[in-house]
Image (cartoon, helix red, strand yellow):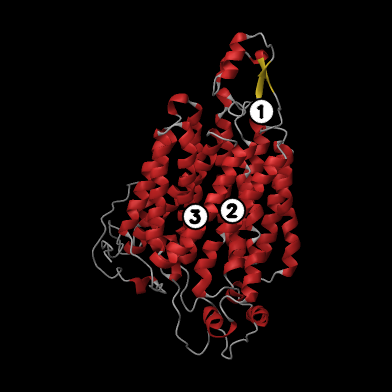
Amino acid sequence: MTATLPNRGNLTFDEALQQSVGELGRGQRCRFCLAGLALVPAAMQTFTMYFVALDPFRQQAWWCNDPEDLSCQAAQRAAGHSACHLPPEAWHWLDRGQSIASEWDLVCGSAWKLHLVNAAYFGGCIIGISLFVGLSEHLGRKKVLGCAATLAGLSGLAGAGAPTYWWYMAARVCSGVAAAGMTLAGRALATEPIGPSWRGVAGVTTCFFTILGGLFTVLLAFLVPGWRAATFLMALPCLLYPILLPSMHESPAWLLMAGRKGDAIAGLAAIASANKSRLPEAPLQDSIAAGAEQKGLLAMLHHARLRKRLLIMLTVSAAASQVYFGLGLSLQNMAGPVHLNQALGFTIEALGCGVTLLVMMRCGCRVTVAYSMLQGGVACLLCAVTSVGLQRVWALAGRFGAASALSLTQLYTAELLSSDVHNGALITTAQAGHVGAMAGPAMMMLTQLPAAASVPFFVWGPVTIAAALLLSLLPDTLGSSVPETMQDMGGASSARRLRIRWPKLPGVRHVFKRAQNSQWIRLGDVDSDQE
Protein backbone atom coordinates (compact mmCIF):
# COMPACT_ATOMS: atom_id res chain seq x y z
CA MET A 1 0.00 0.00 0.00
CA THR A 2 1.29 3.49 -0.82
CA ALA A 3 1.95 5.64 2.19
CA THR A 4 0.44 9.10 2.60
CA LEU A 5 3.27 11.56 2.84
CA PRO A 6 3.22 14.42 5.30
CA ASN A 7 2.74 17.98 4.04
CA ARG A 8 6.11 19.68 3.76
CA GLY A 9 5.07 22.96 2.02
CA ASN A 10 5.63 21.88 -1.57
CA LEU A 11 3.34 19.00 -2.50
CA THR A 12 4.27 15.80 -4.25
CA PHE A 13 2.12 14.60 -7.12
CA ASP A 14 0.32 12.07 -4.92
CA GLU A 15 -0.33 14.65 -2.21
CA ALA A 16 -1.88 16.99 -4.77
CA LEU A 17 -4.27 14.22 -5.82
CA GLN A 18 -5.15 13.30 -2.25
CA GLN A 19 -5.59 16.78 -0.83
CA SER A 20 -7.22 18.70 -3.66
CA VAL A 21 -7.63 17.23 -7.17
CA GLY A 22 -9.21 13.89 -6.17
CA GLU A 23 -7.99 10.33 -6.39
CA LEU A 24 -10.60 8.60 -8.56
CA GLY A 25 -12.87 11.20 -10.06
CA ARG A 26 -14.48 11.39 -13.45
CA GLY A 27 -11.27 12.70 -15.04
CA GLN A 28 -9.23 9.73 -13.86
CA ARG A 29 -11.93 7.21 -14.78
CA CYS A 30 -12.16 8.52 -18.35
CA ARG A 31 -8.39 8.41 -18.77
CA PHE A 32 -8.29 4.93 -17.27
CA CYS A 33 -10.80 3.62 -19.80
CA LEU A 34 -9.19 5.30 -22.83
CA ALA A 35 -5.66 4.18 -21.94
CA GLY A 36 -6.80 0.76 -20.76
CA LEU A 37 -8.34 0.07 -24.14
CA ALA A 38 -4.78 -0.24 -25.47
CA LEU A 39 -4.54 -3.55 -23.63
CA VAL A 40 -7.36 -5.00 -25.75
CA PRO A 41 -5.50 -5.06 -29.11
CA ALA A 42 -2.26 -5.92 -27.29
CA ALA A 43 -3.96 -8.96 -25.79
CA MET A 44 -5.33 -9.93 -29.20
CA GLN A 45 -1.78 -10.06 -30.52
CA THR A 46 -0.89 -12.44 -27.69
CA PHE A 47 -3.90 -14.75 -27.73
CA THR A 48 -3.92 -15.20 -31.49
CA MET A 49 -1.44 -18.05 -30.84
CA TYR A 50 -4.33 -20.13 -29.46
CA PHE A 51 -5.94 -20.33 -32.92
CA VAL A 52 -3.46 -19.76 -35.75
CA ALA A 53 -1.27 -22.69 -34.64
CA LEU A 54 -3.96 -25.32 -34.11
CA ASP A 55 -2.83 -28.91 -34.61
CA PRO A 56 -4.74 -30.01 -37.75
CA PHE A 57 -4.54 -33.68 -36.78
CA ARG A 58 -6.30 -33.08 -33.48
CA GLN A 59 -8.87 -30.95 -35.32
CA GLN A 60 -9.49 -33.81 -37.81
CA ALA A 61 -8.68 -31.46 -40.68
CA TRP A 62 -7.36 -34.12 -43.07
CA TRP A 63 -8.87 -36.77 -45.34
CA CYS A 64 -7.84 -39.90 -47.18
CA ASN A 65 -7.29 -39.63 -50.93
CA ASP A 66 -8.53 -43.18 -51.53
CA PRO A 67 -11.71 -44.24 -49.68
CA GLU A 68 -10.65 -47.87 -50.21
CA ASP A 69 -7.32 -47.42 -48.42
CA LEU A 70 -7.95 -49.40 -45.23
CA SER A 71 -4.75 -48.30 -43.47
CA CYS A 72 -5.59 -44.64 -44.10
CA GLN A 73 -9.16 -45.13 -42.91
CA ALA A 74 -7.92 -46.81 -39.75
CA ALA A 75 -5.50 -43.94 -39.10
CA GLN A 76 -8.30 -41.43 -39.60
CA ARG A 77 -10.49 -43.16 -37.03
CA ALA A 78 -7.63 -43.25 -34.53
CA ALA A 79 -6.88 -40.22 -32.38
CA GLY A 80 -3.62 -38.30 -32.44
CA HIS A 81 -1.00 -38.26 -35.15
CA SER A 82 -1.60 -41.59 -36.84
CA ALA A 83 -1.34 -39.97 -40.28
CA CYS A 84 2.37 -39.45 -39.66
CA HIS A 85 2.86 -43.15 -40.39
CA LEU A 86 1.14 -42.89 -43.80
CA PRO A 87 2.83 -41.95 -47.05
CA PRO A 88 2.22 -38.27 -47.99
CA GLU A 89 0.30 -39.23 -51.15
CA ALA A 90 -2.27 -41.19 -49.12
CA TRP A 91 -3.99 -38.16 -47.55
CA HIS A 92 -4.55 -34.40 -47.93
CA TRP A 93 -5.57 -31.38 -45.87
CA LEU A 94 -9.24 -30.39 -45.98
CA ASP A 95 -8.31 -26.70 -45.66
CA ARG A 96 -4.63 -25.89 -45.97
CA GLY A 97 -5.22 -22.31 -44.86
CA GLN A 98 -6.85 -23.22 -41.56
CA SER A 99 -3.65 -22.87 -39.52
CA ILE A 100 0.07 -22.36 -39.99
CA ALA A 101 0.53 -26.09 -39.29
CA SER A 102 -1.38 -27.14 -42.39
CA GLU A 103 -0.06 -24.17 -44.40
CA TRP A 104 3.60 -25.16 -43.96
CA ASP A 105 3.20 -28.84 -42.95
CA LEU A 106 4.31 -28.27 -39.35
CA VAL A 107 3.28 -31.75 -38.29
CA CYS A 108 4.96 -35.00 -37.31
CA GLY A 109 8.71 -34.33 -37.23
CA SER A 110 8.20 -30.57 -37.66
CA ALA A 111 5.44 -30.14 -35.04
CA TRP A 112 7.88 -28.60 -32.56
CA LYS A 113 7.94 -25.47 -34.72
CA LEU A 114 4.36 -24.68 -33.67
CA HIS A 115 5.46 -24.13 -30.09
CA LEU A 116 8.78 -22.57 -31.04
CA VAL A 117 7.03 -19.63 -32.68
CA ASN A 118 4.94 -19.10 -29.54
CA ALA A 119 8.04 -19.13 -27.35
CA ALA A 120 9.69 -16.68 -29.75
CA TYR A 121 6.75 -14.30 -29.31
CA PHE A 122 7.40 -14.09 -25.57
CA GLY A 123 11.07 -13.60 -26.30
CA GLY A 124 9.98 -10.54 -28.24
CA CYS A 125 8.00 -9.39 -25.21
CA ILE A 126 11.16 -9.50 -23.09
CA ILE A 127 12.94 -7.35 -25.67
CA GLY A 128 9.96 -5.00 -25.84
CA ILE A 129 9.92 -4.35 -22.10
CA SER A 130 13.64 -3.60 -22.09
CA LEU A 131 13.30 -1.30 -25.10
CA PHE A 132 10.13 0.61 -24.35
CA VAL A 133 10.70 1.18 -20.64
CA GLY A 134 13.63 3.41 -21.52
CA LEU A 135 11.78 5.11 -24.34
CA SER A 136 8.77 5.80 -22.13
CA GLU A 137 11.01 7.57 -19.60
CA HIS A 138 12.50 9.81 -22.30
CA LEU A 139 9.66 10.29 -24.79
CA GLY A 140 6.64 9.92 -22.55
CA ARG A 141 3.92 7.32 -22.24
CA LYS A 142 1.69 8.71 -24.97
CA LYS A 143 4.29 8.75 -27.75
CA VAL A 144 5.50 5.28 -26.86
CA LEU A 145 1.94 3.96 -26.89
CA GLY A 146 1.35 5.35 -30.38
CA CYS A 147 4.63 3.96 -31.73
CA ALA A 148 4.08 0.54 -30.16
CA ALA A 149 0.51 0.31 -31.47
CA THR A 150 1.64 1.17 -34.99
CA LEU A 151 4.46 -1.37 -34.83
CA ALA A 152 2.06 -4.04 -33.53
CA GLY A 153 -0.35 -3.39 -36.38
CA LEU A 154 2.35 -3.48 -39.05
CA SER A 155 3.85 -6.64 -37.55
CA GLY A 156 0.43 -8.28 -37.60
CA LEU A 157 -0.04 -7.39 -41.26
CA ALA A 158 3.43 -8.75 -42.04
CA GLY A 159 2.55 -11.99 -40.26
CA ALA A 160 -0.73 -12.29 -42.17
CA GLY A 161 1.15 -12.10 -45.46
CA ALA A 162 4.17 -14.17 -44.41
CA PRO A 163 5.37 -16.36 -47.31
CA THR A 164 7.37 -18.75 -45.11
CA TYR A 165 7.44 -20.04 -41.56
CA TRP A 166 10.60 -18.15 -40.64
CA TRP A 167 9.15 -14.92 -42.01
CA TYR A 168 6.11 -15.49 -39.82
CA MET A 169 8.29 -16.12 -36.76
CA ALA A 170 10.14 -12.84 -37.32
CA ALA A 171 6.81 -11.04 -37.55
CA ARG A 172 5.64 -12.67 -34.31
CA VAL A 173 8.81 -11.58 -32.50
CA CYS A 174 8.13 -8.00 -33.64
CA SER A 175 4.52 -8.36 -32.50
CA GLY A 176 5.78 -9.43 -29.07
CA VAL A 177 8.06 -6.40 -28.88
CA ALA A 178 5.20 -4.08 -29.78
CA ALA A 179 2.57 -5.74 -27.58
CA ALA A 180 4.85 -5.42 -24.55
CA GLY A 181 5.29 -1.71 -25.32
CA MET A 182 1.55 -1.19 -25.68
CA THR A 183 0.87 -2.94 -22.38
CA LEU A 184 3.61 -1.04 -20.55
CA ALA A 185 2.63 2.42 -21.80
CA GLY A 186 -1.12 1.75 -21.64
CA ARG A 187 -1.00 0.67 -18.00
CA ALA A 188 1.17 3.63 -17.06
CA LEU A 189 -1.18 6.12 -18.75
CA ALA A 190 -4.19 4.44 -17.15
CA THR A 191 -2.95 4.20 -13.56
CA GLU A 192 -0.49 7.07 -12.98
CA PRO A 193 -3.15 9.84 -12.79
CA ILE A 194 -5.08 7.84 -10.16
CA GLY A 195 -4.52 8.58 -6.50
CA PRO A 196 -2.33 6.27 -4.39
CA SER A 197 -5.29 4.89 -2.44
CA TRP A 198 -6.79 3.43 -5.61
CA ARG A 199 -3.77 2.99 -7.89
CA GLY A 200 -3.09 -0.59 -6.87
CA VAL A 201 -6.71 -1.62 -7.35
CA ALA A 202 -6.73 0.11 -10.74
CA GLY A 203 -3.63 -1.82 -11.77
CA VAL A 204 -5.34 -5.10 -10.93
CA THR A 205 -8.48 -3.99 -12.77
CA THR A 206 -6.55 -3.63 -16.03
CA CYS A 207 -6.69 -7.43 -16.31
CA PHE A 208 -10.31 -7.05 -17.47
CA PHE A 209 -9.11 -5.24 -20.60
CA THR A 210 -6.78 -8.15 -21.32
CA ILE A 211 -9.64 -10.62 -20.85
CA LEU A 212 -11.83 -8.54 -23.17
CA GLY A 213 -9.09 -8.77 -25.80
CA GLY A 214 -9.07 -12.55 -25.35
CA LEU A 215 -12.84 -12.76 -25.89
CA PHE A 216 -12.60 -10.63 -29.04
CA THR A 217 -9.87 -12.97 -30.28
CA VAL A 218 -12.13 -16.00 -29.76
CA LEU A 219 -14.97 -14.28 -31.61
CA LEU A 220 -12.83 -13.29 -34.59
CA ALA A 221 -11.21 -16.73 -34.81
CA PHE A 222 -14.67 -18.35 -34.78
CA LEU A 223 -16.13 -16.07 -37.45
CA VAL A 224 -13.01 -16.07 -39.66
CA PRO A 225 -11.51 -19.59 -39.59
CA GLY A 226 -8.57 -18.93 -41.96
CA TRP A 227 -5.43 -17.99 -40.04
CA ARG A 228 -4.30 -15.32 -42.52
CA ALA A 229 -7.61 -13.46 -42.51
CA ALA A 230 -7.88 -13.75 -38.73
CA THR A 231 -4.33 -12.43 -38.23
CA PHE A 232 -5.07 -9.54 -40.59
CA LEU A 233 -8.24 -8.56 -38.74
CA MET A 234 -6.55 -8.82 -35.33
CA ALA A 235 -3.88 -6.37 -36.50
CA LEU A 236 -6.37 -3.67 -37.48
CA PRO A 237 -7.32 -2.60 -33.91
CA CYS A 238 -3.66 -1.86 -33.25
CA LEU A 239 -3.51 0.43 -36.29
CA LEU A 240 -6.79 2.10 -35.35
CA TYR A 241 -6.00 2.71 -31.70
CA PRO A 242 -3.69 5.75 -32.31
CA ILE A 243 -6.82 7.60 -33.49
CA LEU A 244 -7.74 7.89 -29.80
CA LEU A 245 -4.43 9.46 -28.79
CA PRO A 246 -5.35 13.12 -29.61
CA SER A 247 -8.18 12.86 -27.07
CA MET A 248 -5.77 11.65 -24.36
CA HIS A 249 -3.37 13.71 -22.23
CA GLU A 250 0.16 12.79 -21.33
CA SER A 251 0.68 11.45 -17.83
CA PRO A 252 1.09 14.42 -15.44
CA ALA A 253 3.33 12.26 -13.26
CA TRP A 254 5.75 11.72 -16.15
CA LEU A 255 5.62 15.41 -17.12
CA LEU A 256 6.58 16.37 -13.58
CA MET A 257 9.37 13.79 -13.52
CA ALA A 258 10.64 15.04 -16.90
CA GLY A 259 10.91 18.61 -15.60
CA ARG A 260 7.88 19.92 -17.52
CA LYS A 261 6.21 21.35 -14.43
CA GLY A 262 3.95 23.73 -16.32
CA ASP A 263 2.54 20.96 -18.50
CA ALA A 264 2.10 18.77 -15.43
CA ILE A 265 0.08 21.47 -13.69
CA ALA A 266 -2.01 21.88 -16.84
CA GLY A 267 -2.68 18.13 -16.85
CA LEU A 268 -3.71 18.23 -13.21
CA ALA A 269 -5.95 21.20 -13.97
CA ALA A 270 -7.72 19.19 -16.68
CA ILE A 271 -8.28 16.33 -14.23
CA ALA A 272 -9.49 18.76 -11.54
CA SER A 273 -11.91 20.35 -14.00
CA ALA A 274 -13.40 16.96 -14.93
CA ASN A 275 -13.57 16.05 -11.22
CA LYS A 276 -15.20 19.42 -10.39
CA SER A 277 -12.44 20.05 -7.89
CA ARG A 278 -9.54 22.49 -7.81
CA LEU A 279 -5.77 22.60 -7.96
CA PRO A 280 -3.90 22.72 -4.63
CA GLU A 281 -2.85 26.11 -3.36
CA ALA A 282 0.63 24.89 -2.41
CA PRO A 283 3.14 24.51 -5.26
CA LEU A 284 4.21 21.13 -6.60
CA GLN A 285 7.63 19.66 -5.98
CA ASP A 286 9.89 19.50 -9.00
CA SER A 287 9.96 15.68 -8.94
CA ILE A 288 7.53 13.00 -7.81
CA ALA A 289 10.43 11.07 -6.33
CA ALA A 290 10.34 13.22 -3.19
CA GLY A 291 14.09 13.05 -2.91
CA ALA A 292 14.34 9.28 -3.30
CA GLU A 293 16.43 8.47 -6.36
CA GLN A 294 15.45 5.26 -8.13
CA LYS A 295 18.00 2.48 -7.65
CA GLY A 296 18.72 -0.39 -9.99
CA LEU A 297 18.75 -4.16 -9.78
CA LEU A 298 22.27 -4.41 -8.34
CA ALA A 299 21.29 -2.19 -5.41
CA MET A 300 18.43 -4.56 -4.61
CA LEU A 301 20.68 -7.60 -4.81
CA HIS A 302 23.09 -5.97 -2.35
CA HIS A 303 20.33 -5.66 0.25
CA ALA A 304 19.57 -8.99 1.93
CA ARG A 305 15.90 -8.37 2.65
CA LEU A 306 15.12 -6.86 -0.75
CA ARG A 307 17.07 -9.60 -2.51
CA LYS A 308 15.11 -12.34 -0.79
CA ARG A 309 11.75 -10.76 -1.50
CA LEU A 310 12.59 -9.97 -5.11
CA LEU A 311 13.85 -13.47 -5.93
CA ILE A 312 10.73 -15.07 -4.46
CA MET A 313 8.45 -12.77 -6.46
CA LEU A 314 10.42 -13.47 -9.64
CA THR A 315 9.84 -17.18 -9.05
CA VAL A 316 6.14 -16.63 -8.42
CA SER A 317 5.73 -14.50 -11.55
CA ALA A 318 7.53 -17.03 -13.76
CA ALA A 319 5.60 -19.99 -12.34
CA ALA A 320 2.20 -18.30 -12.66
CA SER A 321 2.88 -17.23 -16.27
CA GLN A 322 4.10 -20.70 -17.20
CA VAL A 323 0.89 -22.31 -15.91
CA TYR A 324 -1.37 -19.62 -17.36
CA PHE A 325 -0.13 -19.85 -20.94
CA GLY A 326 0.64 -23.55 -20.74
CA LEU A 327 -2.93 -24.38 -19.76
CA GLY A 328 -4.23 -21.98 -22.39
CA LEU A 329 -2.33 -23.85 -25.09
CA SER A 330 -3.35 -27.21 -23.62
CA LEU A 331 -7.05 -26.46 -24.02
CA GLN A 332 -6.78 -26.94 -27.79
CA ASN A 333 -5.85 -30.59 -27.18
CA MET A 334 -8.66 -31.31 -24.74
CA ALA A 335 -12.25 -32.44 -25.19
CA GLY A 336 -14.69 -29.99 -26.71
CA PRO A 337 -14.52 -27.34 -29.46
CA VAL A 338 -11.41 -25.20 -29.11
CA HIS A 339 -13.35 -21.92 -29.44
CA LEU A 340 -15.75 -22.91 -26.67
CA ASN A 341 -12.87 -24.01 -24.44
CA GLN A 342 -11.09 -20.70 -24.85
CA ALA A 343 -14.28 -18.67 -24.36
CA LEU A 344 -14.92 -20.55 -21.13
CA GLY A 345 -11.31 -19.96 -20.10
CA PHE A 346 -11.52 -16.18 -20.49
CA THR A 347 -14.90 -16.09 -18.76
CA ILE A 348 -13.42 -18.02 -15.84
CA GLU A 349 -10.51 -15.57 -15.75
CA ALA A 350 -12.90 -12.61 -15.50
CA LEU A 351 -14.60 -14.30 -12.56
CA GLY A 352 -11.21 -15.02 -11.01
CA CYS A 353 -10.06 -11.39 -11.29
CA GLY A 354 -13.30 -10.17 -9.71
CA VAL A 355 -13.01 -12.60 -6.81
CA THR A 356 -9.33 -11.71 -6.45
CA LEU A 357 -10.13 -8.02 -5.99
CA LEU A 358 -12.63 -8.77 -3.24
CA VAL A 359 -10.41 -11.27 -1.41
CA MET A 360 -7.32 -9.07 -1.75
CA MET A 361 -9.05 -6.12 -0.07
CA ARG A 362 -10.03 -8.30 2.88
CA CYS A 363 -7.14 -10.76 3.24
CA GLY A 364 -4.23 -8.99 1.56
CA CYS A 365 -2.07 -9.89 -1.43
CA ARG A 366 0.06 -12.63 0.11
CA VAL A 367 -2.80 -14.91 1.11
CA THR A 368 -4.65 -14.31 -2.16
CA VAL A 369 -1.62 -15.02 -4.36
CA ALA A 370 -0.62 -18.07 -2.34
CA TYR A 371 -4.02 -19.75 -2.51
CA SER A 372 -4.37 -18.86 -6.20
CA MET A 373 -0.99 -20.47 -6.94
CA LEU A 374 -1.91 -23.55 -4.94
CA GLN A 375 -5.12 -23.87 -6.92
CA GLY A 376 -3.24 -23.63 -10.20
CA GLY A 377 -0.64 -26.19 -9.14
CA VAL A 378 -3.13 -28.73 -7.83
CA ALA A 379 -5.23 -28.33 -10.97
CA CYS A 380 -2.18 -29.12 -13.13
CA LEU A 381 -1.52 -32.33 -11.18
CA LEU A 382 -5.17 -33.34 -11.57
CA CYS A 383 -4.93 -32.71 -15.32
CA ALA A 384 -2.03 -35.14 -15.43
CA VAL A 385 -3.85 -38.02 -13.75
CA THR A 386 -7.47 -37.69 -14.91
CA SER A 387 -9.26 -38.67 -18.10
CA VAL A 388 -9.56 -36.43 -21.15
CA GLY A 389 -13.13 -35.50 -20.28
CA LEU A 390 -12.18 -34.14 -16.84
CA GLN A 391 -8.99 -32.47 -18.00
CA ARG A 392 -10.89 -29.48 -19.34
CA VAL A 393 -12.53 -28.89 -15.95
CA TRP A 394 -9.20 -28.92 -14.11
CA ALA A 395 -7.53 -26.82 -16.80
CA LEU A 396 -10.19 -24.13 -16.41
CA ALA A 397 -9.77 -24.25 -12.63
CA GLY A 398 -6.02 -23.87 -13.11
CA ARG A 399 -6.49 -20.84 -15.34
CA PHE A 400 -8.71 -19.32 -12.65
CA GLY A 401 -5.88 -19.63 -10.14
CA ALA A 402 -3.04 -18.61 -12.48
CA ALA A 403 -4.90 -15.54 -13.78
CA SER A 404 -5.74 -14.48 -10.23
CA ALA A 405 -2.12 -14.80 -9.15
CA LEU A 406 -0.81 -12.92 -12.19
CA SER A 407 -3.20 -10.02 -11.64
CA LEU A 408 -1.71 -9.42 -8.17
CA THR A 409 1.97 -10.16 -8.78
CA GLN A 410 2.96 -6.60 -9.69
CA LEU A 411 0.96 -5.07 -6.83
CA TYR A 412 2.38 -7.41 -4.21
CA THR A 413 5.91 -6.83 -5.49
CA ALA A 414 5.41 -3.07 -5.13
CA GLU A 415 4.10 -3.49 -1.59
CA LEU A 416 7.07 -5.64 -0.54
CA LEU A 417 9.82 -3.31 -1.73
CA SER A 418 10.76 0.28 -0.99
CA SER A 419 9.66 3.07 -3.32
CA ASP A 420 13.17 3.83 -4.53
CA VAL A 421 13.48 0.42 -6.25
CA HIS A 422 9.95 0.05 -7.61
CA ASN A 423 10.75 0.81 -11.25
CA GLY A 424 13.52 -1.76 -11.60
CA ALA A 425 11.71 -4.36 -9.51
CA LEU A 426 8.45 -4.20 -11.45
CA ILE A 427 10.21 -4.35 -14.80
CA THR A 428 12.29 -7.33 -13.68
CA THR A 429 9.16 -9.08 -12.40
CA ALA A 430 7.41 -8.54 -15.72
CA GLN A 431 10.41 -9.96 -17.59
CA ALA A 432 10.47 -12.99 -15.29
CA GLY A 433 6.82 -13.54 -16.16
CA HIS A 434 7.63 -13.60 -19.84
CA VAL A 435 10.48 -16.03 -19.24
CA GLY A 436 7.95 -18.31 -17.58
CA ALA A 437 5.58 -17.76 -20.47
CA MET A 438 8.32 -18.94 -22.85
CA ALA A 439 8.65 -22.13 -20.83
CA GLY A 440 4.94 -22.93 -21.31
CA PRO A 441 5.15 -23.47 -25.11
CA ALA A 442 8.53 -25.13 -24.70
CA MET A 443 7.01 -27.77 -22.41
CA MET A 444 4.11 -28.19 -24.83
CA MET A 445 6.53 -29.67 -27.36
CA LEU A 446 6.43 -32.84 -25.26
CA THR A 447 2.73 -33.30 -25.96
CA GLN A 448 3.63 -34.46 -29.46
CA LEU A 449 4.92 -37.68 -27.87
CA PRO A 450 2.06 -39.91 -26.64
CA ALA A 451 4.16 -41.28 -23.79
CA ALA A 452 5.04 -37.76 -22.57
CA ALA A 453 1.68 -36.02 -23.02
CA SER A 454 1.23 -35.59 -19.24
CA VAL A 455 4.81 -34.52 -18.48
CA PRO A 456 4.10 -30.75 -18.75
CA PHE A 457 1.39 -31.02 -16.10
CA PHE A 458 3.72 -32.96 -13.81
CA VAL A 459 6.26 -30.14 -14.18
CA TRP A 460 3.89 -27.17 -13.88
CA GLY A 461 2.08 -28.54 -10.83
CA PRO A 462 5.02 -29.03 -8.41
CA VAL A 463 6.76 -25.85 -9.59
CA THR A 464 3.66 -23.76 -8.94
CA ILE A 465 2.99 -25.37 -5.56
CA ALA A 466 6.62 -24.78 -4.55
CA ALA A 467 6.32 -21.11 -5.57
CA ALA A 468 3.15 -20.82 -3.48
CA LEU A 469 4.93 -22.27 -0.45
CA LEU A 470 7.77 -19.77 -0.88
CA LEU A 471 5.26 -17.00 -0.23
CA SER A 472 5.10 -18.14 3.39
CA LEU A 473 8.60 -16.62 3.77
CA LEU A 474 7.26 -13.16 2.89
CA PRO A 475 5.40 -10.75 5.17
CA ASP A 476 1.74 -9.82 4.92
CA THR A 477 1.41 -6.25 3.61
CA LEU A 478 -2.27 -5.71 4.40
CA GLY A 479 -2.65 -2.34 6.12
CA SER A 480 1.07 -1.53 5.99
CA SER A 481 2.79 1.35 4.24
CA VAL A 482 5.59 1.19 1.67
CA PRO A 483 9.00 2.44 2.91
CA GLU A 484 10.41 5.32 0.92
CA THR A 485 14.01 4.10 0.79
CA MET A 486 16.00 0.92 1.25
CA GLN A 487 17.34 2.27 4.54
CA ASP A 488 13.79 2.62 5.87
CA MET A 489 13.30 -1.13 5.46
CA GLY A 490 16.10 -1.96 7.88
CA GLY A 491 18.14 -5.13 7.68
CA ALA A 492 21.07 -3.42 5.97
CA SER A 493 23.16 -2.21 8.87
CA SER A 494 24.57 -5.47 10.21
CA ALA A 495 28.27 -6.17 9.82
CA ARG A 496 27.75 -9.83 9.06
CA ARG A 497 29.08 -11.07 5.76
CA LEU A 498 27.51 -13.27 3.14
CA ARG A 499 30.33 -15.56 2.09
CA ILE A 500 30.15 -15.88 -1.68
CA ARG A 501 33.45 -16.62 -3.38
CA TRP A 502 33.34 -15.48 -7.00
CA PRO A 503 34.92 -17.68 -9.71
CA LYS A 504 38.56 -17.00 -10.37
CA LEU A 505 38.06 -15.80 -13.92
CA PRO A 506 39.80 -12.78 -15.44
CA GLY A 507 37.80 -9.65 -14.75
CA VAL A 508 35.04 -11.26 -12.70
CA ARG A 509 36.54 -10.50 -9.27
CA HIS A 510 37.33 -6.95 -10.37
CA VAL A 511 33.77 -6.28 -11.48
CA PHE A 512 31.95 -7.64 -8.43
CA LYS A 513 34.38 -6.99 -5.56
CA ARG A 514 33.57 -4.09 -3.24
CA ALA A 515 35.90 -1.19 -2.55
CA GLN A 516 37.23 -2.78 0.63
CA ASN A 517 39.55 -4.91 -1.57
CA SER A 518 38.25 -8.02 0.19
CA GLN A 519 37.88 -11.49 -1.29
CA TRP A 520 34.29 -11.57 0.08
CA ILE A 521 31.31 -9.59 -1.09
CA ARG A 522 29.79 -7.57 1.74
CA LEU A 523 26.04 -7.53 1.25
CA GLY A 524 24.92 -6.22 4.62
CA ASP A 525 22.51 -8.04 6.80
CA VAL A 526 21.48 -11.55 5.87
CA ASP A 527 18.64 -11.79 8.36
CA SER A 528 15.95 -14.41 7.99
CA ASP A 529 13.27 -11.76 7.36
CA GLN A 530 11.10 -13.08 10.17
CA GLU A 531 8.41 -10.43 10.33
Q: Quick one: label 3, few (<14), some, or many (20+) residues within 10 Å?
A: many
Name the image quarter holding residue 168. top right
Q: Amino acid at mark 1?
A: Ser
The residue wearing badge 3 is 352
Q: Residue at coordinates 54% horizontally, 55% vertically from top-left?
A: 350
* Structural distance between the alpha carbons of marks 1 and 2: 28 Å
Say whether residue 265 is left or right of residue 19: right
Q: Amino acid at mark 2?
A: Ile
Q: Residue at coordinates 68% horizontally, 71% vertically from top-left?
A: 249
The residue wearing badge 2 is 211
Name the image quarter holding residue 194. bottom right
Q: Residue at coordinates 65% horizontally, 37% vertically from top-left?
A: 52
Q: Nearer the viewer, mark 1 or mark 2?
A: 2
**Tag 3 and tag 1, C-beta contact below 8 Å:** no
Name the image quarter holding residue 379. top left
Q: Amino acid at mark 3?
A: Gly
Measured as percent of width and height from the top left, residue 525 is found at 27, 65
Tag count: 3
Q: Nearer the viewer, mark 3 or mark 1?
A: 3
The residue wearing badge 1 is 102
Q: Quick one: label 1, few (<14), some, or many (20+) residues within 10 Å?
A: many
Mark 3 residue element:
helix
Measured as percent of width and height from the top left, residue 523 is found at 31, 62
**Tag 1 and tag 2, C-beta contact below 8 Å:** no
Q: Nearer the viewer, mark 3 or mark 2?
A: 3
Residue 452 appears in the picture as rendered: yes
- Position above or below: 240 against 466: below
